[in-house]
Image (tube, rainbow, N blue to C red):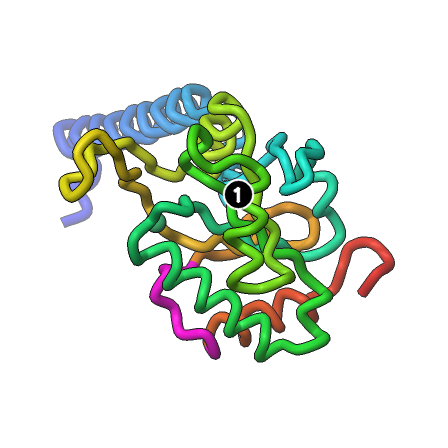
Amino acid sequence: MTRKTTDPKQVGASRRTLVLALLIGLAAGVLTAVLLATLPSGAPSTQTTGKALIGGPFSLLDPSGKRVTEKDFAGKPLLVYFGFTHCPDVCPAGLQVIAAALDQLGDKANGLSAVFITVDPERDTPELMGKYVASFHKNIIGLSGSPEDIAAVTKTYRVYAKKVPDETNPGEYNVDHSSFMYLMDRNGEFMRHFPHSVDAKALADALAKAIDSPASGSDA
Ligand code: NI
């Protein structure tokens, strides 16, 4: 019986198996190395900053025509909503929810900023945005800008917006657009988004949580 293990054929076979196993292991190692090398550098950190894929720097005009950027909102959580003043139903519904949530927060609402950015810069002047948004809530800031400003910010927030003919008003147009609210933390990092149909209480709770979340700076 012991002879079997010393059988040259057997020994040869197990050596071949061992060599094969080593080669497979080596190939797997090489493949892993190649895969890692071809991935963008720092793949794991891309994942953590994947949040930042929504939002980022912007440059827009406030209702007085003053240029504002994301830096003007730094230090507080920021709720960002996109739409346009001619919007028949979705935008007003979303703005009403935001207004109701701000009312529920009461004084606590001073701990965050809320902006409504137009996707229709041709018709929505800074002044018009200011008047329109003020009819919903005094704490929501309407923002407009040049078509280039708006193209840049919608791209940054991955907002879909496209002009389409208004079927009920020949010669006029509507803007098809995605209608999410984006909650950014006090450092300008994306936290989460909500549909425009979000419940006001749920939104208020989420905003309160963002306001209470510790700051990396001193104003906690
Ligand atoms: Ni709308």
Q: Residue sitting at 43 percent across and 25 percent down?
A: 39
Q: Which kind of residue does numbered mark 1 sit on?
A: Leu
Q: Nearer the viewer, residue 123 or 6?
A: 123
The quarter holding residue 62 reads top right
Residue identified by numbered label 1: 128
Helix, strand, or loop for circle 1? helix
Q: Is residue 198 above or below residue 36?
A: below
Q: Is residue 117 above or below residue 42?
A: below
* x, y percent for residue 126: 58, 38
Question: Is residue 3 in view?
Answer: no
* x, y percent for residue 170: 17, 34
Q: Residue sitting at 33 percent across and 45 percent down?
A: 178
Q: Is mark 1 within 8 Å of ligand 1?
A: no
Residue 2 counted in the magenta span: no
Residues drawn in magenta: 194-201
Q: Residue sitting at 68 percent across and 67 percent down?
A: 211
